[in-house]
Every structure is written in structure tokens, then in C-alpha cells.
Image: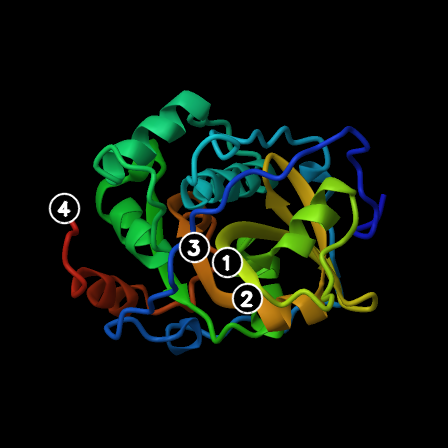
């Protein structure tokens, strides 16, 4: 099975949007300021993720894609590192989302959610840090290669919904009318074919690099604590990253 194979032939229906306008806090530097990542290989595809049951996690009924995506990212990292842990179910994700949104289904800003996750261990899933990238597909691939997944925001059109429902890759069409922001989690890519695989709406979706270059408006390296303890990031300036995140406020640890 390659990154270009759509593994799920079952009927599927797109869920809801819920990613609000991208916001990069001025206190945070780009990821590269805290440590250089190695150049990404041309292809990253991980068999450990082929059998993962991702789940919609409430995103069919609520605009909680930022929360569902956060859980999907940690699920992916745990599977790749063979870490045994429990994950929130749909009810827990929706409950956390509605508490965060004061009972309203109004979506969330990715950077605000990550700050909350870092400060309080959102839904019991602990972060060692996070930082924005320069939104390039190249750096997104580097993040996927090193951290196992990326946390990105994309702007969607109705044609993207049709493509998803029809098991077609996301690619640019004449439809340029944006209907909502969405959080998806890249977990693999094939640079030869210029395509990536992302987790969204309970399954995986193929995405053309050209589509990502046009639609991706934010890309975050999210570092679960389990990744830091592997020792793969010994060259990272954890002290500075932690200081910059703490400067944002709202950190209770």
C-alpha cells in the first residue's frame, strides 16, 4: 500500500468546519529558530497508521475539527512510537470543545487551542511544546518526518467537499469561493507524486501539494511529551521554546 492509495472504499460524508482565522502569536518564533530539522526524505508512509481507526470525534455534528485534529495527531504519534495510552472518545472531545467554547459551537483558533493544551494538558494529552512553521509544503513534510504528523489549517471550498465524498484527492478547481476553515493532520506524503495524506473527518484523504500551497494558511509542529522523551530532539532549544510559550500566558505548570 502506498501513500497514493485510498484505503477506505466505504461511503463517507464530509463533516463540519470549525477552524477560525489563523493567528501566529508574536512571542513565538518559527520552528527553525528553536532547532533545524533534517531534510525530509522524498517519501514518508507509515504502515503503523494504515489500520488506525480515527473516528469523527464529534466533527459530523459540531465544528470541533481543531479538537478532533489534536486527538488524531496524538493518536498518530502514539501509534508510531508504540505508546500504549487511552484517548478521548467522541463524547469526551465534544464535551471539552463545548467547555472551551462556553457552550457554543463557534469553532476555535488553532494557536489558542495549542496554548490551552500546553498549559493544562487538554483532555489528558500532554504537550512538550509547539511552534509555527513558514507554511511551506517542504517544512510541513519535515515536520511529518520528524514528529510523525503536523497540525495544519486549510481553507475549503464546496468542490473540496464533493471530492472528499467521492473519494477523490483534494485538487484545485475553478471553485475558489471559501466556505470555511478546517483543521487536518498530515501523516504521510510522496514528493515524487506531489501528494500528501491527511487525517480528516474520521478517515484519510489524499491532497495534492498544489492544493496545499494554495489553501494551507497555517502549519504547526506539535510536540507531544512522548516525542520529547525519545531523545530525537536533543538539539532543540527547549529552554527558549518553553520561555516563549510561557510568555503567551495561561500556562499553569
Image location of residue 181, percent across then percent down: 48, 56
Please indicate whether residue 253 sits to the left or right of residue 17 in the image: left
Mark 2 or mark 4: which comes first in sequence?
2
The image quarter in which residue 233 lies? bottom left
In this rendering, which labeled residue sits more in front, label 2 or label 1? 2
Residue bearing mark 4: 252
Residue bearing mark 1: 152
Query: Residue, x 29% and y 33% (percent of image)?
Result: 98
Q: Residues within 10 Å of mark 1 (few under 14, many from 20)?
A: many
Marks 1 and 3, Cα distance to the nearest angstrom?
10 Å
Query: Residue, x 33% and y 66% (percent of image)?
Result: 23
Q: Check if mark 3's residue and mark 4's residue have beta carbons within 8 Å.
A: no
Query: Does dot 2 land on a helix, a strand or a loop?
Result: strand
Residue bearing mark 3: 222
Image location of residue 50, percent across then percent down: 72, 37
Marks 1 and 4, Cα distance to the nearest angstrom?
25 Å
Towards the viewer: 129 or 60: 60
Q: Check if mark 2's residue and mark 1's residue have beta carbons within 8 Å.
A: yes
In this rendering, which labeled residue sits more in front, label 2 or label 3? 2
Amino acid at each position: 500500500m502506498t501513500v497514493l492509495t485510498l484505503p477506505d472504499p466505504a461511503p463517507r460524508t464530509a463533516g463540519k468546519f470549525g477552524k477560525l482565522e489563523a493567528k501566529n502569536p508574536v512571542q513565538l518564533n518559527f520552528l527553525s529558530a528553536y532547532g533545524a530539522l533534517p531534510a525530509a526524505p522524498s517519501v514518508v508512509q507509515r504502515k503503523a497508521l494504515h489500520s488506525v481507526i480515527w473516528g469523527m470525534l464529534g466533527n459530523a455534528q459540531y465544528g470541533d475539527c481543531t479538537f478532533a485534529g489534536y486527538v488524531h495527531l496524538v493518536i498518530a504519534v502514539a501509534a508510531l512510537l508504540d505508546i500504549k495510552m487511552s484517548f478521548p472518545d467522541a463524547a469526551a472531545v465534544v464535551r471539552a470543545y463545548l467547555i472551551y467554547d462556553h457552550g457554543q459551537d463557534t469553532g476555535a483558533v488553532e494557536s489558542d487551542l495549542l496554548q490551552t493544551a500546553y498549559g493544562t494538558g487538554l483532555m489528558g494529552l500532554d504537550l512538550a511544546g509547539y511552534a509555527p512553521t513558514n507554511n511551506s509544503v517542504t517544512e510541513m513534510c519535515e515536520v511529518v518526518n520528524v514528529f510523525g504528523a503536523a497540525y495544519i489549517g486549510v481553507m475549503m471550498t464546496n468542490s473540496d467537499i464533493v471530492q472528499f465524498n467521492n473519494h477523490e484527492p483534494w485538487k484545485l478547481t475553478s471553485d475558489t469561493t471559501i466556505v470555511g476553515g478546517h483543521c487536518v493532520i498530515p501523516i504521510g506524503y510522496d514528493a515524487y507524486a506531489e501528494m500528501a495524506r491527511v487525517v480528516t473527518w474520521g478517515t484519510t484523504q489524499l491532497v495534492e501539494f498544489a492544493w496545499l500551497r494554495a489553501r494551507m494558511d497555517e502549519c504547526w509542529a506539535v510536540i507531544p511529551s512522548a516525542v520529547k522523551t525519545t531523545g530525537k530532539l536533543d538539539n532543540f532549544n527547549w529552554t527558549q521554546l518553553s520561555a516563549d510559550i510561557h510568555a503567551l500566558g495561561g500556562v499553569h505548570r
